Image: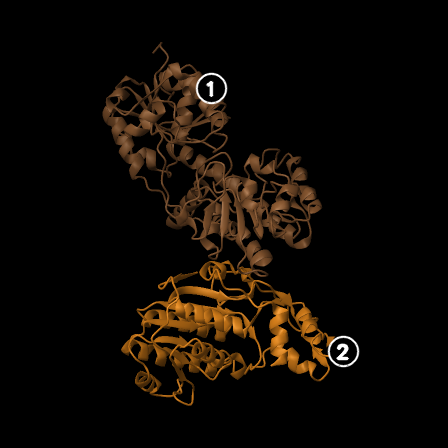
Chain colours: A brown, B orange
């Protein structure tokens, strides 16, 4: 093959859209496919179903090279077809593989026989090998999407991890040409290793985060401050400047939980000792409810009918996704009090809490409330001035797990400011 | 974690209390009567659950669709040995036999935090129930017996150390400290370093009532989430007396153990429930 390969992404999910935009940005003609006609029409008109920093601009700048279709026959014109649907999970983190199996079947059916098909979604070890078909080219590639940083991750990957039926055989020309355009290392390994590599990455991240979450709780109780300790850890070469050391409300999001559930299931089925992974899961469940416990201890114990201001509903900043959102988990456990909520990207839904109402702005939500909880660290919330909050809140308690607000300024404003990992 | 078969609170047709003459039983009967709930109070005087033929006798007292609260047990102060263990299991067998013959609509089984070993660390409902004594083993066995015998929802409640006025036991903690303080001196095991979670009897009763009204099923630990050392507990007790009470240690005989609870499951199960502050509950018990 001499001409540049034509790329397709099947499944216009967060992953699929961002990856397709990245492909177009590397000068490849790119097709975004979904069977959802309305979604395709919206994408064709430049209306994105997701919020992702820099994505609109990236798509606009590369509009001439990217097209969208809901017609499966259009896949026949593509040389390299990524299959990238979301893999739904249940409450226990177990994957529902039916959607990807359906899309994979569609890709095999409509792609040319010489086309390369790549599974990009997160699948359990063993999935890709058993879905091979005779005389077809199937590969697996690890995705490392991070909501809010998806464009950077898609356009400037650290490396590619590729799973192959035979790791010793060179990659097909179209696949290699595409990956090489990103200028990063390409690590080819057998299917099972690549599938487990994705899980291994996430387990390492969870180990770091759980260490931070565990010691943050100890800090809160002994008068230490985790934020003072973190810089010392980052300067340790064995730990590193980019390590996941910021404490959080468990490991929200779903994908990490999915991988932990996969490791536990594999360990149980195969007789491997995976107790540490169960401990990570238990710690995550415990820390997920930090804000709820703080509210009971600092607000409800003194005033059972307290009203609340809630800032942030999305599961993290710069996304509209509420899947596994700590804010929604908190709402589900609150007594039937009045809660005034604001999120820059999420409209409150009545089904989340019977006393929930939507505020038009962050400070409006604070008007007359007995306490404030900031559950998503949106940049807008970091710009709030504690004095402005104090002027509107009736109570003095601010539960701010991610330290959006300046702690000294909160003290100066007369607010009692509770932060993960800081002395209570 | 509990799930509620009645998301909105609902009066049961009748509540049968087994063990109504105990520390919790008396107060529960009063609390339910105050709410207008029909109560059938059964103590050992009416049915001796450890006696032969107790199951048949209990059947005569039960109605279809009763809510049954199973509190009756020989507590550790009545014996920690094999005889007490067997008697308690025999009581459990009699109750289960009766519940199989007269199916209830709901059962609340009052277990104990003795089902957890002290090395369990921060305890929640997912902590491994691995008792280290016969009392805890008995409760765990009775939990399983009830769950096997009853088809209706079963709530297993595992209280921590309960204190309050009218305590029929003399277990180490606030109640015994109050009795000791009357003589001007509270003596601790070691220096009282062990931390425990003490819950007042009124909070235990309130949580049982909530479980009844919501027809809850599952497991819930009854604790406050606030642990303190026995020394601190003793000093709080001492502060209630007008004269100075000496809180003194003794040479330590046993290793220090701690117990703390994550009580998030209570917040989730009953969002409107509020614990009585320890100092307030202690003062109330002192007055009573």
Viewer-side residue, A202 vs A374: A374
Residue B150 left/right relative to B26: left
Q: Is residue B214 above or below residue A249?
A: below
Q: Is residue A69 left or right of residue A202?
A: left
For the residue carrying disc 1, how many other residues have a C-alpha within 10 Å: few (<14), some (14-19), or many (20+)?
some
Please tell me which residue lies in front, A410 or A53. Answer: A410
Q: State whether residue A113 appears in this view.
A: no
Q: Residue at x 62, y 71 (%)?
A: B280
Q: Position of residue A185 (x, y in %)?
A: 49, 22
Mark 2 vs mark 1: give the one in front. Answer: 2
Residue B19 visible in the shown view: yes
Label 2 marks which chain's residue? B
Question: Label 1's element?
Answer: loop
Identify the residue under disc 1.
A182
Q: Which residue is mark 2?
A: B244
Tell me where residue B169 sits by quadrant: bottom right
């Amino acid at each position: 093959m001499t001409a540049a390969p034509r790329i397709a992404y099947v499944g216009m999910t967060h992953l699929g859209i961002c990856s397709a935009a990245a492909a177009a940005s590397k000068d490849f003609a790119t097709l975004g496919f979904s069977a959802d006609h309305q979604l395709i029409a919206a994408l064709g008109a430049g209306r994105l179903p997701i919020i992702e920093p820099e994505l609109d601009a990236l798509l606009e700048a590369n509009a001439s090279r990217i097209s969208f279709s809901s017609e499966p026959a259009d896949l026949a014109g593509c040389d390299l077809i990524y299959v990238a649907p979301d893999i739904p999970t249940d409450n226990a983190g177990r994957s529902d593989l039916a959607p990807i199996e359906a899309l994979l079947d569609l890709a095999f059916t409509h792609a040319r026989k010489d086309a390369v098909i790549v599974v990009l979604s997160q699948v359990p070890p063993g999935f890709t090998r058993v879905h091979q078909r005779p005389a077809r080219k199937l590969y697996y590639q690890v995705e490392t999407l991070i909501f809010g940083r998806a464009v950077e991750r898609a356009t400037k990957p650290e490396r590619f991890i590729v799973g192959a039926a035979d790791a010793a055989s060179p990659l097909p020309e179209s696949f290699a040409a595409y990956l090489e355009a990103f200028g990063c290392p390409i690590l080819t390994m057998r299917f099972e290793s690549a599938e487990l590599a994705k899980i291994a990455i996430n387990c390492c991240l969870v180990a770091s985060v759980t260490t931070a979450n565990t010691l943050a709780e100890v800090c809160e109780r002994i008068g230490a401050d985790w934020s003072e300790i973190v810089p010392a850890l980052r300067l340790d070469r064995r730990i590193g400047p980019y390590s996941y050391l910021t404490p959080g409300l468990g490991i929200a999001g779903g994908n990490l939980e999915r991988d932990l559930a996969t490791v536990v299931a594999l360990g149980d089925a195969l007789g491997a000792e995976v107790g540490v992974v169960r401990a990570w899961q238990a710690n995550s469940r415990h820390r997920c409810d930090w804000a709820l416990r703080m509210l009971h201890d600092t607000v409800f114990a003194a005033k059972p009918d307290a009203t609340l201001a809630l800032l942030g509903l999305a599961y993290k900043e710069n996304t509209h996704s509420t899947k596994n959102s700590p804010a929604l988990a908190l709402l589900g456990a609150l007594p039937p009090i009045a809660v005034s909520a604001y999120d820059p990207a999420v409209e409150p839904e009545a089904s989340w809490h019977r006393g929930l109402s939507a505020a038009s702005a962050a400070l409006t939500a604070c008007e007359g409330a007995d306490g404030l909880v900031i559950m998503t660290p949106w940049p807008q919330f970091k710009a709030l001035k504690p004095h402005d909050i104090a002027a509107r809140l009736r109570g003095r308690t601010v539960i701010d797990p991610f330290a959006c607000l300046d702690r000294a300024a909160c003290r100066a404003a007369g607010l009692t400011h509770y932060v993960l990992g800081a002395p209570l | 974690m509990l799930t509620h078969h009645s998301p909105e609170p609902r009066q049961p047709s009748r509540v049968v209390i087994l063990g109504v003459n105990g520390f919790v039983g008396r107060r529960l009967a009063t609390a339910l009567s105050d709410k207008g709930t029909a109560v059938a109070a059964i103590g050992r005087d009416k049915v001796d659950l450890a006696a032969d033929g107790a199951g048949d006798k209990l059947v005569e007292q039960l109605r279809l669709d009763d809510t049954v609260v199973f509190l009756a047990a020989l507590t550790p102060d009545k014996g920690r040995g094999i005889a007490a263990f067997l008697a308690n299991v025999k009581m459990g067998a009699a109750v289960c036999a009766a519940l199989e013959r007269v199916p209830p609509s709901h059962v609340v089984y009052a277990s104990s935090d003795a089902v957890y070993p002290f090395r369990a660390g921060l305890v929640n409902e997912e902590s491994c129930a691995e008792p280290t004594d016969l009392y805890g083993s008995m409760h765990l066995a009775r939990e399983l017996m009830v769950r096997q015998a009853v088809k209706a929802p079963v709530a297993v409640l595992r209280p921590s150390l309960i204190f309050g006025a009218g305590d029929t036991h003399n277990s180490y903690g606030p109640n015994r400290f109050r009795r000791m303080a009357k003589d001007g001196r509270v003596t601790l095991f070691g220096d009282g370093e062990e931390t425990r979670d003490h819950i007042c009897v009124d909070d235990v009763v309130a949580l049982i009532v909530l479980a009844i009204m919501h027809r809850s099923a599952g497991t819930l630990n009854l604790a406050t989430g606030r642990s303190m050392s026995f020394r601190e507990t003793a000093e709080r007790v001492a502060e209630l007396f007008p004269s100075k009470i000496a809180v003194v240690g003794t040479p330590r005989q046993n290793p220090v153990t701690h117990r703390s609870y994550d009580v998030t499951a209570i917040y989730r199960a009953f969002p409107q429930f509020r614990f009585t502050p320890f100092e307030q509950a202690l003062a109330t018990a002192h007055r009573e």
